[in-house]
Image: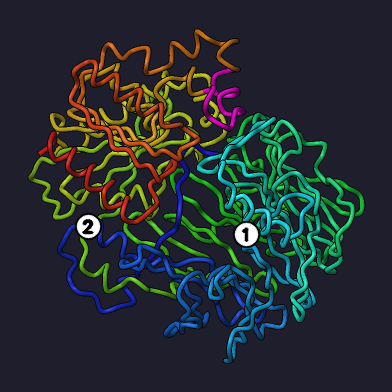
């Protein structure tokens, strides 16, 4: 998984559809936390209604409440369906369109509930002693599949009993015989996510893979897109992690299992790389899924494949696009709607098997478009759209309409008060004269006659990208709010610019990418006269933090630096991180085989050159980039006598997620920048 992944889609509004006050003030941290999250749209079987989720932070409890809402595809005022506090999410329509299944914590634990759409109380379906997630209906509506964590070979009750026993034990010792012992922000406690099927009437649930020693869906980011019912309801396809060499294998496979349980068949065993997101065709004769071709490389091109279930013949239908497929949905018997990563945006395009040599029609463009929910016959779909100056809202595409319709505006009152600038794209000549793309955001209250300090943002991954998106953590408008102009470059290694461009950072974390970044900043400073070249700072997270640490030892052009969850020493990083496929691929092997490569590209090697004041931020539960990396960076800065500050979150992982901690995170960043840029 990525070092630093762009995350949660939070919210918001369309000024054209509301009576808005004049936008007149910069964004604040409170504003960011008060934005309502809008997502998970599901189009009804008749194509007339969309059920979706709205999430709101309760500032008194520091917890998020989510509720289900309903809006007509013809427009009009949305209607709230649930009022119970806590979690109410993952709605899915019954095949007859009369009710919605969803996951809710209203009973004390998260279980599957069903809500009649025309009125009435929600009914609890599952009553397991463990939490469940991701309910999806069988085609005839008598069963619901979902995921839940169990100890392999143990029932849900035995799992719950074992958890209670462990909680009561005085010693909290952990012992391991195999990797992974921890992943992202959690220790391996021996449990695995399994696929269950429950009877809608009785709630009786069956574990379809009771002894599977792997997670399905894959941890920690898998979801219900990783399992699907066959069209006849007799089987389910699911995605599972590798059964061996988990710590150094990127392989995931698509399996097929009877809906009543039994022997599972591995459909993609011949591919040693990753496969995912299985989806049966409407006629049930084919299975589509996304796939990578190079094992050990987590950022290989995700392509869309179609397998004939009778013959096993598999066709690649998207590699000609040279763009990663984020998600897809069957649109017709011959084609799909797919969200593709494309030059700093995520567009929804039409892909047809019979037209693999043609450029696809673009159905939704600009910003980031995701969460496709297809309507009857493929003539319409609901989706989520957001951009740097517009949090997420529900949009609706219909065949024949000139452009998609905006159906919701949950944050219009808040956005009406804010001065939010859009991102502006630019290109320049980077390393080897190649064209490289970047973004500029002007500060609130922009005056072209003034000079503005510059905050230079460096993305993580390293195979990631700065998208024109509304980000819940690294939020562009909040970085710009104190009066900074933002410059963000998509250098070598960025996704959405062709796989060759993405590949060029592997084995070269500090060469062409560094040149791209510096040339991009130089281009922006020379092109936009309102940027103050004498007041610049740089900030980055994960790989971006690595590059900030590298910059600290290689140039003193910046007034200040901010390194969040940054890699400092590649050798020690190898022995303490968890996904070993990552350094094996990125550095060409383990350090005992490639020591000089590790040493030459470690920021720690150049600590003797540190001069720039640096804010270092890290979380104790960051098992991707363990906290010793941040501590090592701070220790070296202190030993060198460089002004520095270490902000350590004992209850956070790779990202700062808890609301109270996010307030502190933003305060520290704004204070540090003000100290050196104002």
Q: How are the residues colored? A: rainbow
1 or 2: mark nearer the eye: 2
Q: Can you say whether 225 is above or below 611 in the image?
A: below
User: Considering the image in quadrants, where does the N terminus appear?
Assistant: top right
Residue corresponding to mark 2: 28
Q: Is residue 304 left or right of residue 492?
A: right
Q: Can you say whether 270 is above or below 377 in the image?
A: above
Q: Can you say whether 464 is above or below 78 in the image?
A: above
Residue corresponding to mark 1: 337
User: Considering the image in quadrants, where does the C terminus appear?
Assistant: top left
Q: Which stretch is magenta?
A: 574-589
Q: Is residue 158 left or right of residue 575?
A: right
Q: Which residue does the image show at 55% across and 28% down from the upper left? A: 503
Earlier-in-chain disc, 1 versus 2: 2
Work out how far the residue at label 1 is from the one at label 2, CA to CA, in angstroms.
37 Å
Q: Residue 544, located in which quarter of the rendered image?
A: top left
Q: Which residue does the image show at 37% across and 16% down from the upper left? A: 604
As helix, strand or loop, the secondary structure at mark 1 comes to strand
């Amino acid at each position: 998984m990525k070092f630093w992944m762009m995350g949660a889609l939070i919210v918001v509004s369309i000024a054209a559809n509301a009576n808005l006050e004049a936008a007149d003030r910069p964004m604040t941290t409170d504003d960011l936390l008060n934005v309502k999250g809008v997502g998970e749209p599901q189009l009804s079987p008749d194509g007339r209604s969309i059920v979706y989720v709205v999430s709101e932070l309760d500032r008194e409890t520091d917890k998020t409440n989510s509720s289900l809402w309903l809006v007509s595809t013809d427009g009009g005022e949305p209607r709230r369906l649930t009022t119970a506090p806590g979690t109410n999410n993952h709605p899915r329509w019954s095949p007859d369109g009369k009710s919605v299944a969803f996951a809710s914590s209203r009973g004390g634990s998260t279980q599957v509930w069903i809500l009649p759409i025309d009125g009435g109380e929600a009914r609890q379906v599952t009553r397991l002693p463990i939490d469940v997630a991701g309910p999806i209906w069988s085609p005839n509506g008598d069963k619901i599949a979902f995921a839940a964590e169990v100890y392999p070979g143990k029932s849900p009750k035995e799992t719950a009993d074992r958890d209670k026993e462990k909680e009561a034990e005085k010693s909290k010792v952990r012992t391991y015989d195999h990797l992974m012992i921890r992943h992202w922000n959690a220790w391996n406690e021996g449990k695995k996510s399994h696929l269950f099927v429950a009877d809608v009437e009785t709630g009786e649930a069956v574990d379809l893979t009771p002894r599977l020693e792997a997670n399905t869906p894959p941890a920690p980011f898998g979801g219900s897109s990783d399992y699907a019912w066959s069209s006849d309801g007799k089987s389910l396809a699911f995605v599972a992690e590798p059964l061996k060499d988990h710590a150094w294998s990127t392989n995931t496979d698509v399996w097929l299992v009877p809906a009543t349980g039994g022997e599972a068949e591995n459909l993609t065993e011949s591919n040693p790389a990753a496969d995912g997101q299985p989806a049966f065709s409407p006629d049930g004769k084919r299975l589509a899924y996304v796939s990578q071709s190079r094992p050990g490389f987590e950022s290989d091109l995700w392509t869309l494949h179609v397998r004939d279930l009778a013959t096993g013949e598999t066709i690649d239908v998207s590699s000609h696009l040279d763009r990663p497929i984020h998600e897809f949905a069957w649109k017709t018997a011959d084609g799909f709607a797919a969200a593709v990563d494309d030059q700093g945006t995520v567009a929804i395009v039409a892909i047809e098997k019979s037209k693999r040599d043609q450029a696809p029609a673009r159905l939704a463009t600009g910003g980031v478009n995701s969460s496709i929910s297809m309507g009857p016959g493929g003539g319409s779909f609901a989706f989520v759209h957001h951009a740097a100056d517009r949090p997420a809202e529900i949009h609706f595409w219909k065949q024949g309409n000139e452009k998609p319709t905006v159906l919701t505006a949950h944050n219009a009152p808040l956005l009406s008060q804010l001065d939010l600038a859009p991102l502006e794209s630019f290109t320049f000549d980077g390393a080897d004269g190649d064209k490289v793309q970047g973004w500029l955001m002007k500060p609130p209250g922009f005056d072209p006659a003034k000079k503005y300090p510059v905050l230079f943002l460096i993305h993580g991954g390293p195979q990631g990208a700065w998208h024109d998106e509304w980000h819940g953590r690294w939020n562009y408008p909040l970085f710009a709010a104190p009066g900074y102009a933002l410059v963000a470059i998509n250098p070598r290694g960025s996704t959405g610019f062709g796989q060759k461009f993405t590949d060029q950072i592997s084995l070269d974390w500090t060469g062409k990418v560094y040149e791209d970044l510096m040339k991009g900043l130089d281009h922006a400073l020379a092109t936009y006269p309102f940027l103050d070249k004498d007041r610049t700072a740089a900030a980055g997270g994960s790989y971006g933090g690595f590059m900030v640490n590298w910059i600290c030892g290689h140039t003193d052009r910046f007034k200040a630096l901010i390194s969040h969850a940054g890699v400092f020493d590649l050798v020690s990083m190898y022995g303490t991180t968890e996904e070993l496929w990552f350094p094996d691929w990125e550095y060409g092997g383990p350090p005992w085989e490639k020591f000089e490569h590790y040493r030459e590209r470690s920021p720690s090697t150049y600590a003797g050159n540190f001069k720039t004041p640096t804010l270092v931020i890290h979380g104790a539960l960051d098992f991707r980039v363990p906290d010793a990396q941040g501590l090592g960076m701070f220790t070296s800065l202190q030993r060198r006598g460089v002004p520095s500050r270490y902000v350590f979150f004992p209850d956070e992982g790779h990202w700062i997620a808890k609301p109270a901690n996010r307030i502190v995170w933003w305060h520290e960043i704004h204070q540090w920048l003000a100290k050196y840029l104002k």
